[in-house]
């Protein structure tokens, strides 16, 4: 398995690649990243060149403040294909990946050799999804639109671990399916990132350095708070 960071559409994307043959672009769902495709990649590597990126905001790819949405992800994936020198590819989309794949096919049908998506809505299903007996299954979609959602889920590393773990453990029919990878999923969501950026922001807090008490206190406080940030994105110094 080869891993690379590729710049496309103004962001840096982590991409896992393996195999040889026609290109097959694998778009993960939520709350996932490239690792969800690892078993598939192992089985298909003798027939396809498999490309599994972390979408913007996921895994090891950049996590800017916004915008996020199918159109943004579509532009990202087209730019990523350009950066990889791929003119045409088959695309598989799961969950959010399906939401990206459909506008991708509409915007650039000449770039798509074939489509397959699963665990995602399709045209005409809207009224059925809004039925009362279905709404309780998609409660999280309304929750994610609430302004307080990031603060509640991301309040501590434990709260983030519990929330993400709920979906990984309860949304699969085969409970053992994630035994060897769920820790990797959660570690990606919880791992602190960009320590250098974190330290560069410190002069906004204090003019001190590590050689004096004020500097040591400021660095220690910033380190502790940055480590608590659960989504792998360094917060500006003014919010520490």
Image (cartoon, grey):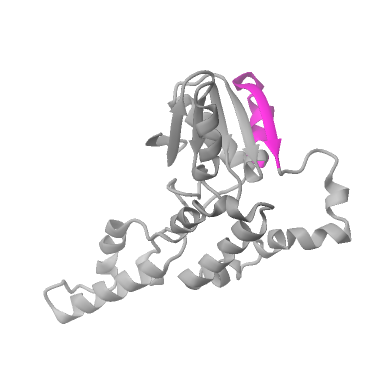
Compared with 54, 166 (above or below) is below
The region drawn magenta spans 99-118
User: What is the x, y in percent for residue 125?
Assistant: 84, 44
Task: Say if residue 102 shows up in the picture.
Answer: no
User: What is the x, y in percent for residue 217?
Assistant: 23, 79
State the residue at coordinates (31%, 71%). 222
Compared with 157, 178 (above or below) is above
Quarter of the N terminus within the rendering: top left
Q: Main secondary structure of the magenta part?
A: helix
User: What is the x, y in percent for residue 24?
Assistant: 56, 26
Task: Say if residue 53 shows up in the picture.
Answer: yes
Residue with the most extreme left position: 211
How many marks on residues? Answer: 0
Quarter of the C terminus within the rendering: bottom left
The answer to whether residue 224 is left or right of residue 51 is left
The answer to whether residue 10 is left or right of residue 91 is left
Who is closer to the viewer here, 123 or 133? 133
User: What is the x, y in percent for residue 45?
Assistant: 50, 26
Rendered image quadrant of residue 149: bottom right
Who is closer to the viewer here, 198 or 2? 2
State the residue at coordinates (76%, 59%). 137
Rendered image quadrant of residue 27: top right
Compared with 131, 227 (above or below) is below
Who is closer to the viewer here, 138 or 194? 138
State the residue at coordinates (70%, 39%). 118
Q: Say whether residue 105 is magenta.
A: yes
């Amino acid at each position: 398995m080869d891993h690379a960071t590729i710049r496309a559409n103004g962001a840096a994307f982590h991409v896992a690649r393996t195999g040889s043959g026609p290109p097959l672009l694998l778009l993960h769902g939520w709350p996932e990243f490239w690792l969800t495709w690892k078993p598939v990649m192992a089985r298909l590597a003798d027939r396809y060149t498999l490309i599994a990126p972390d979408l913007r905001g996921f895994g090891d790819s950049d996590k800017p403040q916004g915008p996020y949405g199918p159109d943004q992800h579509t532009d990202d994936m087209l730019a990523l294909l350009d950066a990889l020198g791929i003119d045409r590819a088959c695309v598989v989309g799961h969950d959010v990946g399906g939401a990206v794949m459909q506008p991708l096919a509409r915007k650039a049908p000449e770039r798509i050799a074939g489509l397959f998506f699963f665990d995602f809505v399709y045209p005409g299903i809207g009224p059925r999804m809004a039925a009362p007996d279905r709404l309780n299954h998609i409660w999280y979609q309304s929750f994610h639109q609430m302004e307080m959602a990031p603060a509640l889920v991301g309040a501590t590393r434990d709260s983030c671990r519990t929330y993400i773990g709920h979906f990984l453990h309860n949304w699969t029919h085969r409970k053992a399916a994630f035994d060897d990878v769920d820790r990797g999923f959660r570690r990606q969501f919880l791992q602190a990132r960009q320590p250098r950026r974190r330290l560069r922001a410190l002069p906004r807090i204090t003019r001190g350095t590590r050689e004096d008490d004020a500097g040591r206190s400021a660095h220690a406080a910033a380190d502790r708070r940055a480590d608590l940030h659960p989504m792998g994105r360094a917060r500006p110094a003014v919010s520490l």
